Image (cartoon, coloured by chain):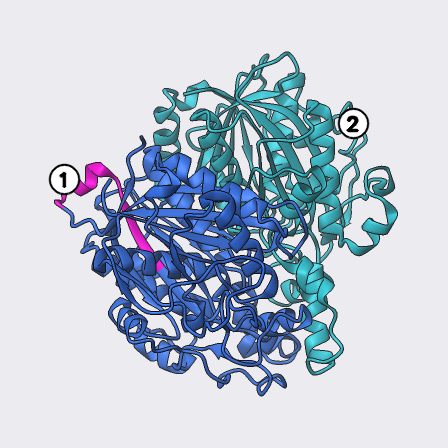
Amino acid sequence: MDQGVAITGMGIISAIGNNVAENYASLIHEKKGISRIQKIDTIHRDEIMVGEIPVSNDEFIAQLGLPQDNNYSRTGMLGVLAAQEALKDARIENIDAYRTGLVSATSVGGMDMTEKYYYDYFTNAECQKYIIAHHAGDSTQKIADHLGINNQLVTTISTACSSAANAIMLGARLIKSGKLDRVLVGGSDCLSKFTINGFKTLMILSDTYNTPFDEHRKGLNLGEAAAFLVLESDHVVKAENKNVLAYVKGYGNANDAYHQTASSENGEGATLAMQQALKVAGLNPKDIDYINAHGTATGNNDLSEGRAFINVFGDKVPDFSSTKAYTGHTLAAAGAIEAVYSVLALQNNIIFPNLNFKTPMKEFNLIPQTKAKQKELKHVLSNSLGFGGNCSTLIFSKNA
Amino acid sequence: MKPVYIHSVASISAQNTVDETAFLDDLVFYEDNVLPAIDPNYKDFIPPTAARRMAKGIKMGVVASKLALNQAGIDKPNAIITGTGLGCLRDSEKFVSAILDNNEQFLTPTPFIQSTHNTVGGQIALELQCKGYNFTYVHASVSFESALLDAELQLKNNEATNILVGGVDELGDHTTELFKLIELIKTEKVSSKALLESQTKGVVYSEGANFFLLTNEKDEKCYAELIDTAIFNTLKKDNLPTAVEIFLNSNKLNPEHVDLLICGHNGDVEHDDYYEVLTSGIFSDTQQAFYKHLSGEFHTASGFGFWLANKILKTQTLPEAVKLNHVKNSEFGYVLLYNQYLGENHSFTLLRKC
């Protein structure tokens, strides 16, 4: 059995809190972060609900002490805040003491600024600074720069809604193979008109609170968030006598190869990803104590994912819940957000409730956990499923 | 650890690179600052109804991947790993324009769906029914090298036996205009033959797709062996020679072992001096080559450099047009590639004859 990779720190900012402690408090107190959109001027305001972080860009700029002429996208600012917290949580003071890389994930990148200044760029020189901040790697560069990560392996993954799970997976592999001693892994995505309208055209946005795994689910709520985890090699953990929060024990990525956006009805990609993760972890399906589902509350996802649960776990599907009812679907960041929640679940031996669930789906007999539940947890499985058929599974464990 | 070999190469670029048997013997010289890639006959590879929905980047990626797979005789690779700096730019531009021009009304989903960065990787998987590992890297000028590094890890550790790796980027009209505005693209037209003499800011911009089939099993068709890849988000010029030496030493080599250094010069007067640190420093007596006067610059242009290195190693010939100095070698054993863009996201890639 392969050894897991140690997680020694984490940081998060989402619609339900500006740090790990606030997120945990909201999760156990059933406090959701879904509301009408405030910060983006969209004609869809009254037809959608979102998981928006109630802090303006100007407030973030002040909080981060950025110069007035900075060219940070909101994705970049959210990323820096979460990554900073993760680094602090891991008690890393000298970033250069070990080979420390960064693998981030985003789908929106600098699109929030691009859509704002798209035509103004030609007439207003002041906003032109954002042109070069459009590409997806820019927010990652900003995070590296802010944390003082230099001369290192820094990269970005964009595989739609599974991006951050894949960043965690790559980070774990880089540590296992000895390419890095430490790596910050996670993702960041802000809300944008681009994604709001994109999902709107796909007709999968709910006009009310999203209801994962419910028969009458109406679609997803988009959200914005960033989360990062610090992964460290056994050598560093030992040398620095680090407190280990949990381990990345298993990971798997597979492609549904079914449709550009929709998941297959039989959940083949998700099934393959979960099976691969169990294999890497050296675990059996019965070892999984809790599944943090992707559970976006779209008709298609929850059916496909539920069927995949049955494919893998048969009639013994473990306790499961989706936390999307709290945060909304935070796209490329979702895998990292839910990694933080999975670690919190392990640390506190608690399963977070799947809010807003009322009616079981008619296709199968799967009922999510709807109330917080105390239970000894050893292994938590987390799914992230995305466009392009991209399916990812991570397994987090208390012990290596 | 297993060795890693490049079994096949495929390139769609501003040069005539689609024919595998040719090697830059029919060069195209431009007098311009933006170079569209030469279209292959897409109909030979993609049904016209499907092709109509695809922007150029997707088409280039799909065709280059098919060429690489056909050549290697592989129907379905274990994994597909793609790099793209700006993703599917044309669809992104189309969707943003539509949002802004029609005040968020009358939108259709296709450009949004296709704007996703992993569209090309997903599309290839869909067509091949390839259910394996599928990643897309989007980190500026190390997007392609990140994909290469990932494949290298998996093949060395024997987690996979064959992996399709590629880099793809497309030109988008709006973005091109924006890049001209802030002089990322040269404001004047430049002759391909005189790119390095331009002495101006910015680059000649282009697009393309470069795909490769990597395996950990050697056969007589192999182009080269991939020894190692390394990426760095920052590197100061002063530290560059040390970084190269550490990279080579970690592979039990010294700068003297390198038979050919291939650099990513792009004619940007503000950043080409990174290459000069090496070309006039530790590699001053080494044969040197460059290629962006032929391929143009874009985030995954280094994929063209990788294609070039593979071609050189297999054919043991160095086309006159890419020579950067007059040092001559009778044989090419080790080839080192160095690339960066705007002084950031540096990469070293080391290949060996096989």
Vertically, is B78 above or below B339?
above
Name the spot of residue B193 as percent of width and height, x first.
Answer: 72, 40
Vertically, is B87 above or below B314?
below
Q: What is the quadrant of residue A124 in the picture?
A: bottom right
Quadrant where the image shows the N terminus of chain B:
top left
In this orientation, does residue A264 appear?
Answer: yes
Badge 2 marks a residue whose secondary structure is: loop
Picture residue at 80% right of the left edge, 43% below the top: B38
Picture residue at 69% right of the left edge, 76% below the top: B99
In this orientation, does residue A154 appear?
Answer: no
Viewer-proximal residue among A216 and B185: A216
Q: How many marks?
A: 2
Write down the residue under mark 2.
B25
Name the spot of residue A48 as percent of width and height, x first.
Answer: 57, 81
Is residue A296 shown left or right of residue B318? Answer: left
Write down the residue under mark 1.
A239
- Front label number (2 vs 1): 1
Check residue B64 in the rendering and tell me which mark sits there, or answer none.
none
Instruction: Give the residues drawn in magenta, as a range.
Output: A228-241
Q: Inspect the magenta stretch and tell me whether residue A229 lies in it.
A: yes
Disc 1 residue type?
Ala
Q: What hue represents chain B? A: cyan
The residues tagged by marks 2 and 1 sit, at their Cα atoms, a distance apart of 57 Å
